[in-house]
Amino acid sequence: MSIPEEHPRLRWEAAADHLLASVLPYATDGHAQYRLPGRTSRSGTVSDGLEGYARTFLLAAFRIAGAGGDVPPALLERYAEGLVCGTDPAHPYAWPALTDMAQQLVEAASIALALHETRPWLFDRLSPQQQERVVDWLAGFIGKRTPDNNWVLFRVIVEQFLAGVGGPHEPSEITGGLERIEEWYAGDGWYTDGKGRNYDYYCGWALHLYPSLWARMSGDTARQELYAGRLRRFLEQYQHFFAADGAPVHQGRSLTYRFATVAPLWLGALTGASPLPPGRTRRIADRVLRHFADHGAPDERGLLTLGWYHEFLPVTQSYSGPASPYWAGKAFLGLLLPPDHPAWTAPEEPALVELADQTLAIPAPGWLLHTTSADGIVRLANHGTDRDRVRTPDGIPDPHYVKLAYTSHTGPEVGEQARGVDNHVTVLAPDGTASLRRFIEPLTTADRFAASAYQDGAVRIVTASVVDGASEIRIHRVTAPAGHQVRDGGHPVAAASETGLFLWQEDGVALARRRPEGDPALAGVKREGGLAPADRSREGDAALTRLPQEDSLARADRSAGGLTSAVRALHGFTGTGLVTATNTNAFGRHSATPYALATSHPGGTALYVSLVWLAGAGQEPPAPAVRVEPDDVVVISLPGGGTVTVDMGTDVPTARREDPAAQHP
């Protein structure tokens, strides 16, 4: 059918065409590899070149199949040529054989899935000899070892394609992979990526995606219904992970895949499993794609770089090569929907984040999500995800997993220069050694309340979070030696230039503000780096003034985009401050993080309470009243009315809310 010029689908087709055209200059002879500019992965140049072919082929496949093969012939020709040359051992750019634990196992799954979707226009038009070479290369997957995580599903996809074309395959390996993920299913739509508590976007763009697409390939209706039910429950929660402007929550690994985050939304529409109105599915997906485009991804060359918005290597992993970001092509799964599908034709419907403030308890990963419609920001309090159980025991905890909170508008401080202050509660010994939050013990996740603990040597910290609008009120029950310091960090905000961040503290407020480029209203703040009490720079005044530590509020503002981060000391802490850094944040080269500090722990166990706040322009951080009663009971009077009583004196903290407005409508 013809598509009207104003059809929303055309925007996605144009975006796909732009991405595919932009990688063409980097194709090798015969189009078997795409060697994009950027840092080489640990697998080497040849593997990276295969990755360039496989991941862009998956994107091309959605474009080709969605158009019923009605695409420029050159698109089909170059991927067909690459397939023939890549599987020819005599070709100078032939693909490496599939071996145990190798990166090419990942890429084989993208190729197999792409071949399945484009079969009438590509595989079926190859000569019998060419088809045999393709089958032989893919069949190298049989019997190969993979990591015990989402990789087991790559075997499922590859061998299912082989089965569909009459090639060699091992049925027990297909069912074995599908049965393996059952051990990782935690309920309510959530999978952990392998053993431990590895909750991240792989739950959606891998552990839901591949089984559902496998069921579509195989025609297994029983498993299809099982996966559809899980996906439906997952999407009921997952739709909240996107800000009103399309920014996804910045948490987990492989974030360089960017808008692949919307793949599960399209998958729900494709399989009939979505609980979302079709107009909302498209609105969220559209905004995510546009959000990254507005922030420089793809770049001026049309390429997706290793980073978040712009190139930023600390957000990547050692397996990430220059073409790794093209798993973002999974976002174009929606092109498999026909043009007259309601997801393309229904009127747009706003996302829930746009309509009202939302709170959501997600027990499986131990997350407490809260959004605010006034600024469209999503915040995620983390009380259960750490990924430490698959990492070296004495290694550095992964900042994309172990932080107390993540948001759609801020990223954790990462890299060798990161100080680890942001969203981390720690005990600091006199020699500067800091306790590390890792091997997190999930304790409870409930209505607007969650708690967890961690132990590091003699230090034990039990943390409870009470969320209220843009606020997270943290209560820490800290067991530590006398004389040690206790520090609780808030959300870091980032700017492109040093003069874009401004720090000051006045009347109990410490603030770092990001101004638009070239705005002379505030003078730039120069800092020596490291931790320091908050500084003050008044408008038009470059002088800095150190303020005493008893000031109760640290705050960081990013004016461009209207973002303000604050930490208020409510109980136990003796002061606040800000720490600045350079080249440690995916959202901008210069960053600042507010924190609360207690200068001397009394020894034994003591309570500390802080307000951690992130909001848009024109809002000010509230000051809830806190009363600490005997037996470690904390009573919080919320600014909007009502109280929350938190009992920290038990093994598992509990919370009781009293809302007068609810009792007297």
Image: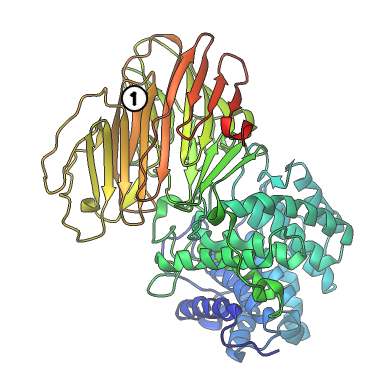
- Asked whether the viewer can see residue 584, the reply is no
- Which colour assignment does the render follow? rainbow
Quadrant where the image shows the C terminus: top right
Task: Kindly identify the residue that appears in the image at 57 percent across and 72 percent down.
Answer: 56
Disc 1 is placed on an element classified as strand
Picture coordinates of residue 333, whole percent (x, y): 65, 69
Picture coordinates of residue 109, whole percent (x, y): 68, 64
Picture coordinates of residue 98, whole percent (x, y): 67, 62
Picture coordinates of residue 649, whole percent (x, y): 57, 13
- Asked whether the viewer can see residue 258, the reply is yes
Label 1 neighbour load within 10 Å: few <14, some 14-19, many 20+ = many
Amino acid beneath label 1: Leu
Task: Kindly identify the residue that appears in the image at 29 percent across and 35 percent down.
Answer: 578
| Residue lying at the far front of the rendered structure | 664
Left or right: 157, with 322 as reference point: right
Left or right: 164, with 360 as reference point: right
Task: Kindly identify the residue that appears in the image at 24 percent across and 60 percent down.
Answer: 517
Q: Quadrant of residue 211?
A: bottom right
Q: Nearer the viewer, residue 648 or 170?
A: 648
Q: Is residue 278 above or below residue 636?
A: below
Which residue is identified by label 1?
597
Q: Is residue 169 above or below residue 547?
A: below
Quadrant where the image shows the N terminus: bottom right
Task: Kindly identify the residue that appears in the image at 15 percent across and 49 percent down.
Answer: 523
